């Protein structure tokens, strides 16, 4: 049990270390908050640099946060996983000082994993829901 | 004819001016290259800040470029248009010094417009294809 | 309480009656099993008429079952709702004598509702997951 | 040249023969009209059996026609290709006596092919546009 905990901790630490090399995520100010076997959470403090011409959070920023949270979860649950396709549904414009993305795997079969990511503002309102399919390189 | 040309030029200039306020697009280094009635082209010079932990262009960067090119085209063709949903298919990792996105409207019906955006590297290879649906606020 | 129950029952009965006019669903052998405020379930007994050239359930049949289950749920939860777009991820070929589709609304905002539909075979294995967005005509 | 033509003809004939075993497509009244290296066309004569409860062509019928046209094209262009995911955007309700679906491959990379299918009514109006990604089993 203790050994397992250590392994888990090691895997998380290695993953967090690995993702430090993601420079676009750094540029976007995205941070990993939580990684578990059920879900992953990433957040971003919203600054003027994240806004579009209408003064709300830019769609690409929302997508980047969701896609990264998906990548964090799937690369924790499986070996190397790459995004095959992503689908984003915009629900409400985000006027907020913080974005929170939560990724959950909805299903896995063979080399394919499906994942839903909900992005909410600081008050908990859902701004967009994304669905990703990933290809798990090694099973 | 001259009047029409002037109007066209005015509309383009106003649109380019409007999109200068998109701060996330500025952060991502994306530029508008061309706006016509048939297509829009945006580009980005790739720097280390655009790369993911595997050293290729981050998926969120590819999406942001595509989504913005869609927004440029649709807001030129119609009145205010907002993205309803976006779908991205990744085809090849982008190891490149430049990305070029070309948006074309595939169909329009009522308040809905559909658009395909192809993102290529400097050599012309397609990195991803995106499909967007937009809601045209005023017809 | 009793009045409310009666109303609920009346709405369900009216909806089931309305959907009897869906002739393609009848042709496909799809039946409504359950309608609640949380989910809707539809099923189909699989016959040779549902199979593709490889001997497993045809992709269009899987989609039709999922799309209809979405329509049943959303038209129960809201006033008239029409499908805007549907997205289907195929996970496993369905060799089965029965298909069960379960629809759950994942989010609603303004005129838009999002819904996930899971289609399983008789043993509970997920064959495909569909995500729909609907437009609610009257709020 | 003649030999090549014969081979082409043989491949088409074999494919048409193979797809005769698709019983759901037969049930839906879908027919292969044309197969070329650039596109494939399938059609369906619309009867009351294809309609939904609102009296227009059922969404699952539209999807089935599009998905099959995609399958016909991709299995002609490549070896065995299976659908990974399908995305359908509904544009106009179809009140028509005939549906025509035209599939074109938009890109191919490695084992992945992307395809757009436009479904029009008898007057040429686009009812829906579908985007599919397929997995090419053998390259």
Image: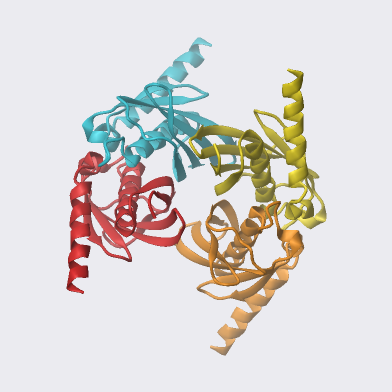
Chain colours: A cyan, B red, C yellow, D orange
The quadrant of the image that shows the N terminus of chain B is bottom left
Q: Position of residue C40 (x, y in %)?
A: 69, 35
- Front one among B112 and A31: B112
Residue situated furthest front in the rendering: C3
Q: Position of residue D136 (x, y in %)?
A: 55, 58
* Residue A68 vertical placement versus D89 (above, below): above
Side (left or right) of C11 relative to B66 = right
Side (left or right) of A125 relative to D28 = left
- Front one among D51 and A63: D51
Residue situated furthest bottom in the rendering: D2
Q: Determine if residue C127 is in view.
A: no
Q: Determine if residue B81 is in view.
A: yes
Q: Quadrant of residue A58?
A: top left
Residue situated furthest top in the rendering: A2
- Front one among A34 and A47: A47
Identified at 17% across, 72% down, the residue is: B2
Identified at 28% across, 28% down, the residue is: A46
* Residue B6 vertical placement versus C132 (above, below): below
Identified at 72% across, 62% down, the residue is: D25
How many badges with numbers are in the image? 0
* Residue B75 vertical placement versus D122 (above, below): above
* Residue B59 vertical placement versus A17 (above, below): below
Q: Quadrant of residue D109?
A: bottom left
Q: Position of residue B48 (x, y in %)?
A: 22, 42
Q: Position of residue A27 (x, y in %)?
A: 24, 34
The quadrant of the image that shows the C terminus of chain B is bottom left
């Amino acid at each position: 049990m203790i050994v397992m905990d250590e392994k888990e901790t090691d895997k998380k630490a290695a993953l967090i270390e690995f993702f430090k090399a993601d420079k676009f995520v750094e540029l976007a100010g995205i941070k990993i908050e939580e990684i578990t076997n059920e879900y992953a959470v990433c957040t971003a403090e919203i600054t003027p640099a994240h806004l579009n011409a209408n003064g709300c959070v830019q769609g690409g920023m929302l997508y980047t946060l969701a896609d990264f949270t998906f990548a964090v979860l799937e690369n924790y649950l499986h070996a190397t996983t790459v995004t095959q396709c992503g689908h984003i549904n915009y629900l409400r414009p985000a006027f907020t000082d913080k974005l929170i993305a939560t990724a959950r795997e909805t299903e896995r079969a063979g080399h394919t994993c499906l994942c839903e990511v909900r992005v909410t503002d600081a008050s908990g309102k859902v701004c967009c829901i994304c669905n990703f399919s990933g290809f798990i390189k090694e099973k």
